[in-house]
Image: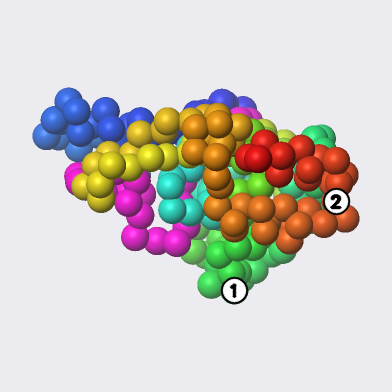
Amino acid sequence: MKKIFLNIVLIITTTLFIGCSTKSEYSLDKPVAKQEGFINYFEKPYYEVFTEQDVEDVAIYLPKDTTTVRLKMKVSNLEDVIYMKLITDDGYEIDKILRRVENMKDLGYEQDGYMYEPSIEKNVVTLQVYVPSIYLYNGVYKPKLIFSFKRNSRSVQEKVKLAFVKHVYSVSNKNAQENPLYSTLSEYCKASNKVSDDFFNQIVKVNENRIYLETIKDIENSCK
């Protein structure tokens, strides 16, 4: 199993600065964002990321406009997926079996699930993970993906550590590049004394009856 760090923003930014005229053959250089103009402008309501084969760690730097990720995972000699689930050992205590769909259109953009269809993409599992803003209040959300599948008529279980990273951005104008000014919600709050209402709405909507009330209050107080 290999480890991989996916920082598409860094790759695109570097490409723009060096003015490279030839197309890179680097496996992570996939058409997920525009190669010129406003960085991190996406034409899809989700962020599509491709991995190498049989990865153990995946870190994804989330774009500004979406926290829905579709991860194209390559798994060698994959015959079928038995189950996939997300777990965390933090205060959110997530242990969630993911829904399998025949077509990703069957999932809303704010839902978790996966698709495995070998007639379309052999040895590839398309995993969709929706990351509510509340999970990113400390700048990073690190769930673990546990999945079981068939390989050579045997049942195999593997784990993938996921890390979703999000910064609070400030953009001077619509044509400017996005520059992360604050890496955590607390830093952002100290400078601006505000945060979006949607963020706090998600605290209850997503985590009611899941995390302690004290945890919710600590998050709310960080911006007061």
> What SS does tag 2 mark?
loop
Q: What residue does disc 2 label?
A: 210
> What SS does tag 1 mark?
helix
In the visual, does 122 lie left or right of 132? left
At 85% across and 51% down in the image, what residue appears? 210
Question: Label 1 to label 2, Cα distance in Å?
Answer: 27 Å
Q: Amino acid at mark 1?
A: Asp
Mark before the other along the chain sequence, 1 or 2:
1
State the mark number for residue 153: none
Q: What residue does disc 1 label?
A: 106
Q: Position of residue 114 (x, y in %)?
A: 63, 59
Tell which of 67 and 149 is nearer to you.
67
At 42% across and 30% down in the image, what residue appears? 181
Q: Position of residue 193 (x, y in %)?
A: 55, 40
Q: Amino acid at mark 2?
A: Arg
In the visual, does 172 lie left or right of 18? right
| Image quadrant assignment for residue 36 | top left
At 15% across and 30% down in the image, what residue appears? 20
Is residue 46 one of those drawn in magenta?
yes
Q: Which residues are magenta?
A: 32-59
Q: Can residue 51 be seen?
A: no
